[in-house]
Amino acid sequence: MIDSSESREIHVADREGRDVDLLHFDTINIAAVVSYVGTGYSGFAFQEGQSTVAGELLRVIEICVGMKPRLSVAGRTDAGVHARGQVISFRLRADIRFSTARFVRSMNSLLDPRVSVRAAWVASDDFDARFSARYRKYRYRIAYGSAPDPFVSSTVWLLRDRLEVAKMREAAEYLLGEHDFSSFCRKDPNGGSLTRRIDEIAIESDSDGLDIWITASSFCHQMVRSIVGLFYQVGTGKLKPEYAESALSARDRSKVKLLAPAMGLVLWEVGYDNGVIPEWS
């Protein structure tokens, strides 16, 4: 049996839609790595009457195992944002016959082609996709060109003119470490703290465009796209690199208004303690 303190996370619905309290059953903790193209989805989080990644996953999980669990997710990506290495976890009754290999095959045969389960495993009882995560890494892709490439246009921000990468890197230095990111985030409706710690920002340039990599323990709503929007303005010369420091100090959302388009953003990787996630590709 599991500890009663977890009861808020383990109520599920059976195939007929009846509520099932898993406290009355032994359970197993399942985790999975999921990739998806966010185009056409209203974000990851389930919303009644909306097309969401969580809704699609739950639809197929219910077909495969006969119950609809409550998902924990490492990153609640917004509408139009993609993921390469999203991680989810959920509990199932232990008396359900469960094979991770069969689960992955069955899920991928039934899911929308925009969504794929890359790996699944039986996790330790205390693992939680959200709360066990040590870091999240996002990549934002900017491409240069005069016309969109239809094969990649849904996953890049297309710009005609090249950006000044050296100045963007200068701006990035001001954002490293722990800060109040109120100027870069939508206000938390529950009054939660907007203090976050950015561990690394890397801006890699190539002949076709550039990749902006941002790694942090966690992110607040719209944080990455706001940072990229500021970098864009610095890269075009509209703002000086040191504006990043003054924007942080202001703690005023109106100081960073430009949101980079969602389509260029990918939740690339979620990090946990060594050995928690099996190798996948």
Image (spheres, rainbow, N blue to C red):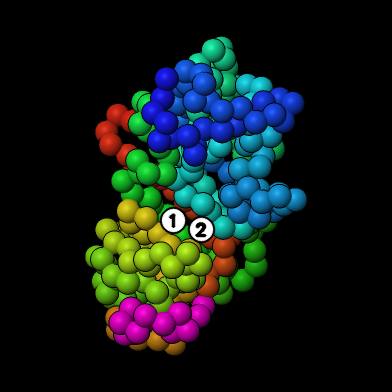
Q: Identify the residue position indicated by label 2 in the image.
A: 265
- Mark earlier in primary sequence (1, 2): 1
Cα distance in 3D space between marks 1 and 2: 6 Å
Above or below, 52 against 177 in this view is above
Q: Amino acid at mark 2?
A: Leu
Residue drawn at the location 56% of the way across and 37% of the way down? 70
**What residue is pinned by disc 1?**
139
User: Start and end of the magenta stretch?
Assistant: 246-258
Q: Residues within 10 Å of mark 2 (few under 14, many from 20)?
A: many
Q: Residue at x 51, y 52 (%)?
A: 76
Q: Tell me, yes or no, whether the highlighted magenta stretch contains residue 2.
A: no
Total label count? 2
- Is 226 placed above or below 32 here? below
On the image, the x and y values in percent for residue 143 come to 52, 64
Q: Amino acid at mark 1?
A: Arg
In the structure shown, which secondary structural element does the residue marked by tag 2 occupy? strand
Horizontal and vertical percent position of residue 218: 37, 55
Q: Quadrant of the C terminus?
A: top left
Overall secondary structure of the magenta section: helix
Q: Residue at x 38, y 52 (%)?
A: 137
Question: Can residue 205 be seen in this snapshot?
Answer: no
Q: Marks 2 and 1: in contact by CB < 8 Å? A: yes
